Image (spheres, rainbow, N blue to C red):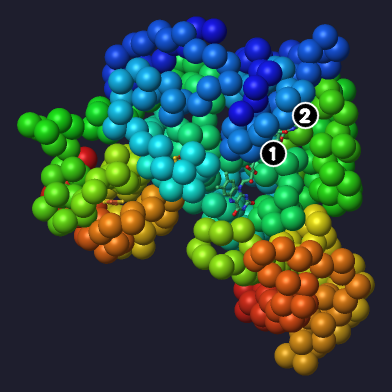
Amino acid sequence: MKLTLTINGKLRSIEIAPNVMLLDVLRAAGYKGVKKGCGEGSCGACAVLIDGRPRNSCLTFAAQCEGSEVLTVEGLGTPENPHPLQDAFVRHGATQCGYCNPGSLIAAKSLLDHTPAPTWEDVKEALDGNLCRCTGYVKRIEAVLDAASLGKK
Amino acid sequence: MLKNLTHVHRPSTIEEACALLAAQDRKNVALAGGTFLAESADLTIQGLVDLSRLELGYIRDTGTGYAIGAMTPVQDVFKSPVLQGPSGKLLKAATGRIGSTLLRHAITVGGNLVCVFPWSDLPPALLALDAEVQIRKGIPKRTVPVQTLLERNPRDFLDRAELVTEIIVPAFGPGTGTSFTKFAKTANDYGLATVAVRLTLRQGLIREARLAISGATKRPVRRPAAEAWLEGLAPTPALFAEAGVRAAQDLDLTQDFRASKEYRSEILPVLVRRGLEEALRQVTA
Ligand SMILES: Cc1cc2nc3c(=O)[nH]c(=O)nc-3n(C[C@H](O)[C@H](O)[C@H](O)COP(=O)(O)OP(=O)(O)OC[C@H]3O[C@@H](n4cnc5c(N)ncnc54)[C@H](O)[C@@H]3O)c2cc1C
Ligand code: FES
Ligand code: FES
């Protein structure tokens, strides 16, 4: 079947099987920033925004996204022009191996879209579905609060 | 993976959706958030009927309570400005403990109820609130108590062409308090014993009590004997401790890698007592 959706602002039309997950479709289409950690909704490495909601792409049928707008980490910023959240993650050491970052950045971006001045607790809650095996959980909270305090999204 | 899936339908009306579910030539099933179906290996499923275009994502104040569309993500319940009072508090406390933020944006109210697991979080809250569900089969509809739906596996209770479309939750006036106590190994693991409580007081006495348990039995259940025993009595610490013991009696407790039967039977009375104490603190003037 044909799937038509917008990925990072670009309208795409992709041939898919009805039973595939959005995660696999995105990676096959070149959006390798979207990571597969567990494949069962537990780690958050696969998080993307679907029509503004942060969701696990590993538990979303690609067919659920007909007509949707999807944002992956590639749509957030570039190495030359990083998003303020990406910049803050680097400055605060909230990244080591980096595997969790695409997901946690998307979850953080969703938080700041709705809550521009979050509290520590708000950030903790917004990232509760994103595991990080390297940096621990304090640095990324500091990073998100810093990005928020710079008043940019 | 749904290996034999060949079709995904996107109906725009409930009538159309139910007609697709009734189809005899192919096995179609309803698709809500997809968090369960994505992991399903059911080889009999050939078609999915996506409910996302049926306009069933809403939370409304009805004057006597709330109407919640079956396709409402549980995150929207958790953050709802519409849901207030003792019912709102309990619904938010329960949905806020489901999985993680990412999962809560996908999991729907209807999916969490119909696809009930021993540890599901929303069903015990709905039981404690005497909630009802609206079920549609095309145009015909019926309204049944959540308790009736949960007496069997809801997917067996529902006809294959039926959809849960709405959950109706009464509001409770002054004198009511609620609480939700989920006991789990980590912040977002499944509950190994969960207790939802509603207490309604009148002139210092318990007029109505609801105790619902999840995580410890095959399906979430109410404890009617303990509830009835509380009614008409004055709330005291000793009464709540005794109610905890009674609520844990005669239960067919589950045993799994998270906890033994013995462990569950030890902690349940404590969780019920604490839940009652918290509900009493929450009683609104
Ligand atoms: C990692 C993980 C952790 C989780 N943690 C928790 C937790 O802590 N607490 C908790 O309560 N839940 C938790 N869940 C959610 C739970 O396990 C189910 O996946 C979820 O409730 C299903 O809802 P859904 O909207 O995604 O349904 P779907 O997967 O879309 O559907 C599930 C089933 O219900 C049927 N269905 C759905 N909606 C309707 C309807 N309106 N009418 C008729 N039939 C319908 C479908 O046909 C299907 O058979 C967790 C899930 C995952 C993956
Ligand atoms: S890969 Fe999706 S949550 Fe882990
Ligand atoms: S930086 Fe390695 S998992 Fe988070």
* Residue drawn at point x = 79 percent, y = 13 percent: B26
For residue B110, which numbered disc appears in the image? 1
Q: Is residue B70 left or right of residue B147?
A: left
Asked if disc 2 and disc 1 are in contact, CB closer than 8 Å, the reply is yes
Query: How far across and how far down the image is residue B41, in percent?
Result: 68, 31
Q: Is residue A72 left or right of residue B221?
A: left
Query: How far across and how far down the image is residue A41, in percent?
Result: 50, 43
* Residue drawn at point x = 77 percent, y = 87 percent: B241
- Note whether ligand 1 is within 8 Å of mark 2: yes
For residue B148, which numbered disc appears in the image? none
Q: Is residue A141 above or below residue B228?
A: above
- Note whether ligand 1 is within 8 Å of mark 1: yes
Secondary-structure class at tag 2: strand
Q: Is residue B263 above or below residue A22?
A: below
* Residue drawn at point x = 18 percent, y = 43 percent: A86
What's the chain of the residue with tag 2?
Answer: B
Query: How far across and how far down the image is residue B57, in percent?
Result: 60, 33
Query: How far across and how far down the image is residue B273, in percent?
Result: 72, 81
Corner quadrant of residue A72? top left
